[in-house]
Image (cartoon, rainbow, N blue to C red):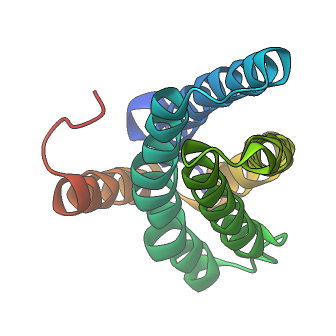
Amino acid sequence: MPEDIPTVEHDPYAVLAREHRLIERALDVLGRICEESRRTRALDAADARQVIHFMREFADRTHHLKEERILFPAIESASFFPGCGLISEHKLGRERVKGMAEAVERSSQGDAEGVRAFRRQAWSFIGLLREHIAKEDDCLATVVHRTFSSEAGDRLSREFEDLERRELGEGVFE
């Protein structure tokens, strides 16, 4: 274990944990959309599309890419990292988001089954991502803190910022 454990400003996991809290807020909104669609038997397509956009652009394109392209390879090169099925959960999440998007389009064309399909995909996605985040906050945070010094943490944090700038541009989700 490195002697120099990263502080918050040098902690790449702190960046990911902050992002987890934002993703959890979006999951709360998604749950409310599902409840409203159950109550009204209609889907607010605009709200659903907005959450889907956030999940694709922020949760997947920004957050998951930081893990898949930067953090996981860095852990693997520095120590043993079992992965805990995290990447396969990212892939399953992408499938659920795609299913939600398809269901929104079906419901927008008047297909009542599209509303129910949206709810099924959304509730499955919410459960998957909440468990996934809990696993990362518990297991992955410990691995990061045991593996990287402050210097290495700084380097990873800079790489996260660079990836976010390249993928999304400056301050898109700030």
Q: Is residue 135 visible?
A: yes
- In front: 57, or 38? 38
Which residue is located at x 68 percent, y 78 percent? Answer: 79
Q: Which image quadrant: the C terminus? A: top left
Q: Left or right of 151: which side holds 134?
A: right
* Residue at point 68%, 68% (across, down): 95
**Residue 36 figure quarter:** top right
In the image, residue 15 sits, relative to residue 114, either above or below, namely above
Q: Where is 137 relative to 31, above or below? A: below
Relative placement, left or right, of 100 versus 38 is: left
Q: In which quarter of the image is residue 13?
A: top right
Residue 138: horizontal and vertical position, in percent?
82, 43
Residue 53 image offset from top left, x and y in percent? 43, 45
**Residue lying at the far left of the rendered structure:** 170
Query: In which quadrant is the N terminus drawn?
Result: bottom right
Determine the residue positioned at 83% across, 15% down: 39
Q: In this view, does 34 lie above or below 131?
A: above
Q: Where residue 146 appears, x then y in whole percent? A: 69, 55
